[in-house]
Amino acid sequence: MKNNAYKKYLVLGILFVFPIVIYLFFASGINNFAKLPVLTKDIPEIERWTSLSGTPVKFNNKITILGFWGNDLEEKKGDAFNLNQKIYKRFYQFKDFQFVIAVQDSLQDEIKEIISEIEIGVGTDMVKWNFIFGTPNEIEDLFNSLKSDVILSDKQSTSTVFILDRESKLRGRDDDEDVGTLYGYNASSVASLNNKMTDDVKVILAEYRLALKKNNSNRQK
């Protein structure tokens, strides 16, 4: 009798819990099963920019989180910690994933200090954080090429970060429930990173994996 009662409650438990699990799976992100819309094409390549590592950095064939710090580094430390904890640590092991941050030239030493602070503070290897250096005009030109509704400060900086796909196209949302067209994500807001950016990065990575599997399948035919 006890075994039958146990089985009965087990079945009832499964029937009750399973629909909730399925709901949470689908509700974890509104874009899980849709492509992330292309908002801007033809973002210029950056391989001629000076990088902190000395190695040319490219958008092509990389999924890029693009940010603009200009000469406002002190104010961007909080953004850096948020991005590192909520986005970078979660996805950096993906082979073709990278961060690219545009900084005003001559601030290389300050960037090295920030990297050291973050690596010591949270114990994360920032090997896929790429810092590129340019003049204020070069930073503004790159920013303007995104054709977003975000405003760059007079220090050539913003807390908004952007997602670029492997073809250097800006991805985002064209039906966001809060702003309509969402060009980028507020790195100073943990809620924005948790509730929107994490989901959209998952979508773009899933889209890439699907394309990769399709290409591999076509080659085998």
Image (tube, rainbow, N blue to C red):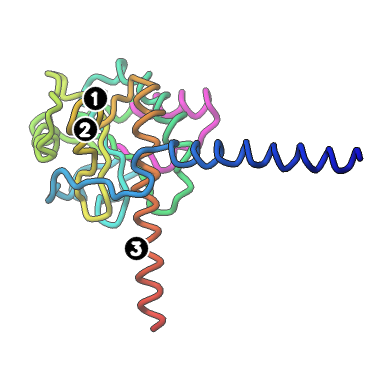
Q: Quadrant of the C terminus?
A: bottom left
| Residue 60, picture quadrant | bottom left
Local secondary structure at mark 2: strand
Residue 211 circle label? 3
Nearest the viewer among 181 and 89 is 181
Residue for badge 2: 182
42 relative to 65, above or below: below
Contact (Cβ within 8 Å) of mark 3 with mark 2:
no
Residue 178 circle label? 1
Q: Residue at x 55, y 30 (%)?
A: 123
Q: Which residues are magenta?
A: 111-131
The amino acid type of the residue labelled 1 equals Asp
Q: Answer left or right for 21 relative to 102.
A: right
For marks 3 and 2, give the CA distance.
24 Å
| Residue 171, picture quadrant | top left
For marks 3 and 1, give the CA distance.
30 Å
The amino acid type of the residue labelled 2 equals Leu
